Amino acid sequence: MPCRNCRAGRIALLLAAALVPFVAVAEQPSRIKGPIDDRARARIHGNSPVQIRAAKDLGNASNLELRRVTLVFGPTAEQAKKLDLLLRQLQDPGSAKYREWLSSSQFANDFGLSKRDVRVVSAWLESRGLRVDEVSPSRTSISVSAPASKIAAAFATSIHRFELDGKPYYANSSDPSVPESLSGLILAIRNLDNFPVKPSRVRIETVNPNFTSSVTSKHFLVPKDLAAIYNIKPLYERGITGKGKTIAVVGQTDLIIADIQQFRRAAGLPANDPRVVLVPGSGNPGIIDDDLIEANLDLQWAGAIAPDAEIIYVNSGNGVLDSFQYAVEHNVAPVISISYGNCEQNFSGGVISALAAITKQANAQGQTIVAASGDRGATDCDYESTVARKGLSVNLPASLPHVTGVGGTRFEEQNGTYWEASNDPGGGSVRGYIPEVVWNDSAESVANGGEFASGGGGVSARFPKPDWQLGIGVPDNVMRNVPDISLAASARHDGYLICNHGSCVSGFLSANGDLTVIGGTSAGAPVFAGFVALLNQLTGERQGNANPMLYWLANQAPDSFHDVVHGDNKSPCTLGSRDCPSGVGSIGFNATSGYDLASGLGSIDAYRLASAWQNATVVSDFELSTVEQSMSVPRGSAANATMTVSASGSFSRSVTLSCELSESLAGSQCSIAPGSVVPNSTVVLTISSPARGMHAYNSSSSIAWIFNAGFIVAGVLLSGRDRRHSFVVFIAAACFALSTFGCGGGSSLQSRGADQASTTASGTVTVRGVSGELVRTVVIPVSLR
């Protein structure tokens, strides 16, 4: 006989095989509903540059060619929630997804636009005469180029020329719009203007032939000095030099490679030219003097701290934010250093939303972003000022929670002997750590015709405080606090040496004996980026967002940081202006013990921090424990046990607690207070027992008894009708017997009242702790007497 089951099995296998290709290529559902109708439009609000409010409008600029105008796509509400959860899991050693970083293509599959929607948007853009330059690998953006007239027509806006502070710019004069069917996809449209973000650095050129001089007391920093001050040398001695690791530095100018080569020769570093990546289709910016000095500072000092790491310089004719976005979307390197920024209030809402989305993607891919916190103290909006009028403000992108913001310190030698009388072959002369205060050279700078020169810090007006920003001194507020750490930033005490535009002819000296000296938080950003590259080599993996571990280690291994407790980042202000009430002549923040809004967590001891970091990633968990091995509860009374929730490794999340008594203790109750705690806390477990003579019964069993009894009565009344009803009576009787007398683990209906209460009962209490995906339990024997 033919095997019908076999035939069915063969059919099932054929169907399964036919479905395999469809499963493999399944993609997210389309978010574009219906045809694209250009007549029904929706504004993309917050996409006009703030700068046009103060700029002079010079009229239409339709003849310009706009390159890489970029549509940045936002996630759905479900995708956003999923991404936020993933970002927590990636930094949680207790999660199965801990450090399971995504590739760009994986990010696309989970959080990017569907392939179908990308095709639809691209087709619409091309139908408007725009050339699609690139769809990002993560499917989070599409870049197009076209004459300004076509761009303006496609997005229903106008591109005008503007003048601001005597310099020419172009920008869209109003928020762009897109067909309504596309509006839910688009977070922002970038590169409709060319207003720049500014580098954070202070430059001083001095004529002084000695790096360290007993006559002038002038000192300048070379790589060997910083390695001694921040205790990086022990890492080098262990072979941790960044070998095999990569750092991306983002900029907006072409380079003179000879500058990097001369710097490394002067500092005694091995030859290691940066690899240059020009964002495709952005145009070549050429050499821009003001940006060249910033690029040289970043490239030379990131490479100085991680001398064997590969340095990739990402350049764009559309500005540094274009370079930054490209470095993330193409997952160029595990570490990204950016020393450009502006105060939060000078960014449109659209750009802020786009940057927040880009930095989340970076963290999901395991990329660590390091940014300068700004050089205008607590008044970042008062750029090129000698008195603050615009109130307290912080620098972005440093204020983004997914970025490590680096503030500034100043060495305070006093009468200490921290420097040797002469330099070694690499120019080094410092003996070791030098005490630090908050960098604030504003008074000296203004007195010499300059502007504010102080480490940026304060409270973000845009971003809520992340749950990892905890610790001694962290303000009890609801917003993100900046900076996270601080490093040397004063160009005067003591500045960084660089080579710029051929300035280094003899070592660090120019032909006429000058040294090019730089300061500012722009120096600290690449220095810390270099340190993260060393961490990557030491641990063998990417770090992603460095902030959760930084704050945890500041509490668990405080000797990894130099606590900066003196100085401030205050700026003189105009009385009566914003945040500067009458009678107060300056605004900003003082250094304090622990975290503060002037120096963050302080500066770092690189070797101790790296060692603590490495050890913290080995294990991270929590456990429940109690001194009591058992509990004895008097009838009609209660008993307590003290339990401890302890942490190991970098575990820092809250733990939710619950308890459950075994069935033999039914009628008694248990509770835990408090029900949710942070690690290294104690809680009280309470068990209360009913008084003697009180009836305690299993309510669910009683309900079953009543239900089944009713079922039987109904069955008896109907049983004479036919065999089916007799069968019902049989089933009801069986259910009654099982539920009433107990079978296979069922509950007994026997009263646990006066008879049982008069005897001793025993059982267990199970205490359960839950934190994310981690679950821990403790079982304690209990007796009632």
Image (tube, rainbow, N blue to C red):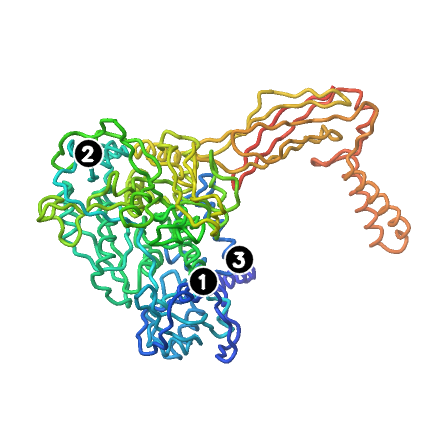
Of the residues shown, which amino acid type is indicated by label 1?
Answer: Gly
Position of 298 with respect to 176 (left or right) is: left
Which residue occupies the foreground of this view, 401 or 617?
401
- Residue under the point 34% across and 78% down: 62
SS label for mark 1: helix
Q: Earlier in the sequence, mark 1 or mark 3?
A: 3
Position of 183 with respect to 685 (left or right) is: left
Of the residues shown, which amino acid type is indicated by label 2?
Answer: Ser
- Residue under the point 68% across and 25% down: 763
Spatial distance from mark 1 to mark 2, Cα to Cα? 49 Å
Q: Which residue is mark 1?
A: 350
User: Residue 671's x, y, as percent?
Assistant: 67, 31
For residue 727, the mark is none
User: Residue 116's x, y, as percent?
Assistant: 44, 69
SS label for mark 3: helix
Q: Are marks 3 and 2 in contact (CB under 8 Å)?
A: no
Please tell me whether mark 1 or mark 2 is closer to you in this view: 2
Spatial distance from mark 3 to mark 2, Cα to Cα? 60 Å
For residue 217, the mark is 2
Spatial distance from mark 1 to mark 3, Cα to Cα? 20 Å
**How crowded is the residue under tag 3: few (<14 C-alpha within 10 Å), some, or many (20+)?**
few
Q: Which residue is mark 3?
A: 78
Of the residues shown, which amino acid type is indicated by label 3?
Answer: Glu
Quarter of the N terminus within the rendering: bottom right
Q: Are marks 1 and 3 in contact (CB under 8 Å)?
A: no
